[in-house]
Structures are given as C-alpha cells and as structure tokens.
Image (spheres, rainbow, N blue to C red):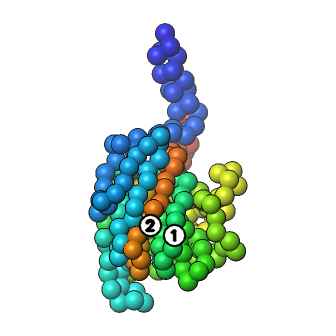
Amino acid sequence: MMRTLILFALLFAGSQGVYTLYAQRLEKMNWFNEPRDWEIKDGTLSVFVTPQTDYWRISHYGFTVDDAPFYYAVYGGEFEAKVKVSGAYKARFDQAGLMVRIDEKHYIKAGIEFVDGTYNLSTVVTHNTSDWSVISLEEAPAFVWIKAVRRRDAVEIFYSFDDKEYVMMRNAYFPDNTPVKVGLMGASPDGEGFRASFENFRVTHLPDQRRLEWLKKNGGE
C-alpha cells in the first residue's frame, strides 16, 4: 500500500510539472583524474586535491591543462545542480566547486578560488578557449553553495552563503541537446594540494521548456 501511495505521489507531481529530485548517490559516480586521497562519509566527498593540476585551455596563458580531479555523473536535458563547498585553500589559484562538462573543449567550472590572498567567486567558461570571471570577497567564507541551472543553450551560475538567497554570477552559452558530465572539481595549479569538501550534492531534473511549449500549443496539459 505504501509503495502504491509513493508511486501515485510521484506521478501526480510529474503531471503538475513539479521538479523531480535526484539525490545523487556519491558512491555511484565516476572519477576523471582520480586523486590519491579521497573518501565519502555521511554524504560528503572529501578530497585532497592533486598538486599542480587545473582545467584551462589556451587563452591568455598559452597552455592547455585538463588534469585536475573531477567526480561526476552524466545527465541529459535541463537540470539544476548544486553543492556546498569548503576548502583549506592556501596557494595561488587553489579552487573547488561545480563543473558541467561535455569534453576537454567545452566545460564550465565555478566555485571558490584563492588568488593572491583574496577569496573569489570564480567562473571559467571554455568553448575551444577559456575565459575567466571573478567576484572578490571581503573575507574568507567558511563555505559557499554553488548552483548551476541548465536551460536550453545556456547555463546560469549562482552562489549563496545560506542555500536560501542565491545571486547570479554568470550566464553563459552551453550547447544543448547534449549529455553532460555534472559534478565536483578541485584544482591546485600552483600549489601542493589542499583538502576540499563537497556536501549535499543534488541534481534536479527540469522539464524541457521546448516540450512544454509544444504541449501548450497543441492542447497538452
């Protein structure tokens, strides 16, 4: 009986256009550039970020690197992903956050990045070449929530310090109708590595907007 009620509730929610929440099991995800030292405990991924690693492609610096730890699952369509990030940043460019990635030429990474003594909310968008935008913080945050919302051919990046009020930090083009790797990344390009933690990682499916518009025009509900 209970199973029937739960199934009915899920079907009802779907018919009302309510988001479906995927409580992503960290144990079922995959590593790209697996670090030596990591563990999952009580729903938290703790990683010692591999030294001398990063994600960057060509522009400004003239080099390409694609060797930092990235723990991910694959999703299609439109979605919202968010995670609570903290780290013991200590060297220039130490960073941790979310990444949405198709391949080595197409990805977005966003999170906290430590640069010359300043903590920054940082976003790198790569389409063949990388660009970088930052929002400087006045003091070191104990943690930050990073959220990525993929809609059609764009990804919006938000940050929050309480998981309630979110502020947009970037809206960037990203190819749609393509499966993507979504997950947790850290990098330490100049340093000897650092400890980063990722809590409460969640991915929420969003109903496809084009399909909803088609249904509306064609008498669907």
Residue to which mark 2 is pinned: 194
Q: Please count the marks in the image.
A: 2
The answer to whether residue 46 of the structure is visible from this angle is: yes
Q: Is residue 130 left or right of residue 28?
A: right
Circles 1, 2 touching at the beta carbon (< 8 Å): yes
Residue 58 placed where, x, y %?
35, 85
Quickly name the residue at label 1: 89
Q: Which mark is residue 39?
A: none
Tag 2 secondary structure:
loop
Residue closer to the observer: 63 or 103: 63
In which quarter of the view is residue 66 placed? bottom left
What kind of residue is marked 2? Phe
Amino acid under label 1? Tyr
Look at the image and tell me in which quarter the C terminus lies.
top right
Along the viewing direction, whichever of 184 and 127 lies nearer the viewer: 184
Q: Position of residue 109 (x, y in %)?
A: 46, 67
